[in-house]
Amino acid sequence: MNTDSAIYETIVDALSWDIAIDSSRLTVTVKDRIATIEGEVRSHSDKLEARRAAQCAAGVRAVIIRIEVLPMNAGYFQSDAQGFNCMTFAAVCD
């Protein structure tokens, strides 16, 4: 059986590996094998990817998602979103 700390490391590693998600805006906690992810993301697909990362971690009993999807016109993500779109476009075209 996986410990809370092992589950935590698995989830954090999965989130940081996925370059589409800005994991610096997410907080992961695990207690009694119940994973909670809180924070803010750019899109619903990012929210779903964060949920998937937690659900796929071995030993997780349940996942609680407290993630807010911020609008793209919010100043919080405006400069990040422009750079992200450029990177995505370049990756598809290369």
Image (spheres, rainbow, N blue to C red):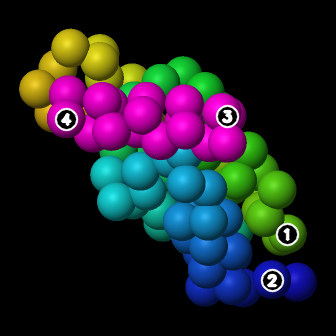
Q: Quadrant of the C terminus?
A: top right
* Residue occupied by mark 1: 58
Task: Residue lying at the far front in this picture: please name it.
Answer: 94
Q: Nearer the viewer, residue 62 or 12?
A: 12
Mark 3 vs mark 2: give the one in front: 3
Q: Nearer the viewer, mark 1 or mark 4?
A: 4
Residue 9's tag is none
Cα–Cα span, label 3 and label 2: 38 Å
> Is residue 39 among the parts visible in the rendering?
yes
Residue 1 location (% of width, % of height): 88, 83
Residue 88 falls in image quadrant: top right
Most common SS among magenta residues = helix
Vertical placement of residue 2 versus 78, above or below? below
- Asked whether the residues under the numbered discs 4 and 3 touch, taking CB atoms below 8 Å apart as contact, a structural biologist would say no
Which amino acid does the dot numbered 1 rest on?
Ala
Callouts 2 and 1 close, C-beta under 8 Å: yes
**Mark 2 or mark 3, which is nearer the start of the sequence?**
2
Residue range in magenta is: 78-94
